[in-house]
Image: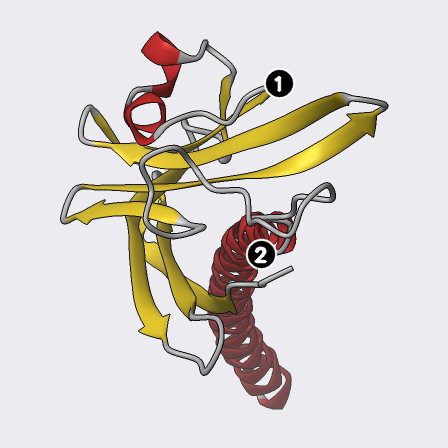
Amino acid sequence: MTITKQKGASLIEFMVASTVGIIALGVMGSLFINSQKIAVQRTKELSLLQSTNSVLQMMNLDMKRAGYNGVTDNLVKLSGADHMFYIENSPTSGLLAYAYVSEISGASIIYSNIVYEQTSAATDVLRICEKKQSTVISVIDAQDFTANVGNNCNTLFHKDRISVDAFNLAQIELPGNKVSSSMVTVQLVTSLKNSPGLSKDLSFSLKQRNW
């Protein structure tokens, strides 16, 4: 009789232990899945941050060359532009254009003409357009680079993965005693197309160099 009770008790204990084990496995599995989801989300977030930051760093570095002449004391700027940086800004588009001397060979001067643009026709894309030639482009050229200068444009983000939600530009005057200057602020807002809730809002400000 005692043996039967012990066997019964052992069976109950086994069933309880099995149930607890199943619950524990379920909890551990749930925790593992959640940790995996968090890791994937974090990886996506870091990837978006790195991509956005890399583009802004590239822009910042190249914009520091804007206006460089290397031949005379005059700043290089687009024909028809009031400032070294020419900008246009609206709720659905943005345009930043500038130029600088990139090569000098004897009497030959080559200018790099640069345009960053988010157009109303493709609001989720940011493009860079560049043309090296013996002349500086005009404001009109910058406004429709492909038609007026050539199809020398490339997207700065993978258009199937990252959406450009905003490319905002602002320029303020910085009056000086001898030479006036300006400050340009560039704001870039991006998000992942397969995870719209993940977004990054980064910006930088750059003072015009009066070479």
Residue 79: x percent and y percent? 38, 32
Residue 129 lies left or right of residue 70; in this view the side is: left
Query: Residue farthest to the right?
Result: 106
Q: Secondary structure at mark 2?
A: helix
Residue 208 in the image, given as x and y percentages of width and height: 51, 63
Q: Give the residue furthest to the left.
A: 91
Q: What amino acid is found at the position of numbered circle 2 in the picture?
A: Asn
Residue on which disc 2 sits: 60
Residue, x 41% and y 28% (percent of image)? 159
Q: Earlier in the sequence, mark 2 or mark 1?
A: 2
Quarter of the image where one finds residue 123: top left
Q: Secondary structure at mark 1?
A: loop
Is residue 201 in view from this perspective?
no
Front residue of 30/187: it is 187
Three-letter amino acid code at disc 1?
Answer: Ser
Residue labelled with disc 1? 134
Circles 2 and 1, Cβ within 8 Å, touching? The answer is no
- Residue at 50% x, 69% y is 207
Give the x, y percent position of residue 183.
42, 68
Q: Residue furthest bottom?
A: 2
Above or below, 125 against 83 in this view is above
